[in-house]
Amino acid sequence: MEYNKDQIIFAVRKIFRNEDQNKVLEELNLEDSGSIRVYLAVLKLSKGNLKDFYLFLKKSQEDYRDVLWQAEYEENGEKELINPYKQILT
């Protein structure tokens, strides 16, 4: 599934408090379309917590596969087949 920067903005506005939204958006390089899926994973895992956002963003910069795995796979190791980001994009 393809994601875009408008979905990132939507997700940030949905899950973060008003006073944190600009901070989060400033940290994300939305012009790098190759990172959109990773950013969605970071947002999903942060659950709207700014401290967790920075933690998962740093983790994604070290090895993006770690955050993708945590965000897209269920605890039993099975991939969420429909849309792993549905909860933050709808």
Image: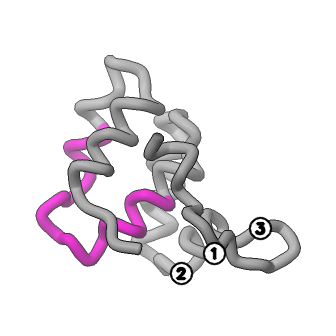
What is the magenta range?
A: 24-41
Q: Against 7, is 60 above or below?
A: below
Q: Which mark is residue 61?
A: none
Q: Which mark is residue 65?
A: 2
Looking at the image, do the residues carrying marks 2 and 3 touch, with CB atoms under 8 Å apart?
no
- The residue closer to the viewer here, 62 or 80, is 80
Q: Is residue 4 left or right of residue 52?
A: left
The residue positioned 22% from the left and 56% from the top of the image is 5
The residue positioned 51% from the left and 34% from the top of the image is 48
Task: For label 1, count other residues whose C-alpha is less than 10 Å away and answer few (under 14), some (14-19) or many (20+).
Answer: some
Whole-percent x, y for residue 10 in the image:
32, 39
* Residue behind mark 3: 74
Separation of residues labelled 3 and 1 (CA atoms)? 9 Å
Circle 1 — which element? helix
Q: Earlier in the sequence, mark 2 or mark 3?
A: 2
Q: Which mark is residue 69?
A: 1
Separation of residues labelled 1 and 2 (CA atoms)? 6 Å
The residue positioned 54% from the left and 51% from the top of the image is 86
Count the numbered circles shown: 3
Circle 3 — which element? loop
Marks 2, 3: nearer the viewer: 3
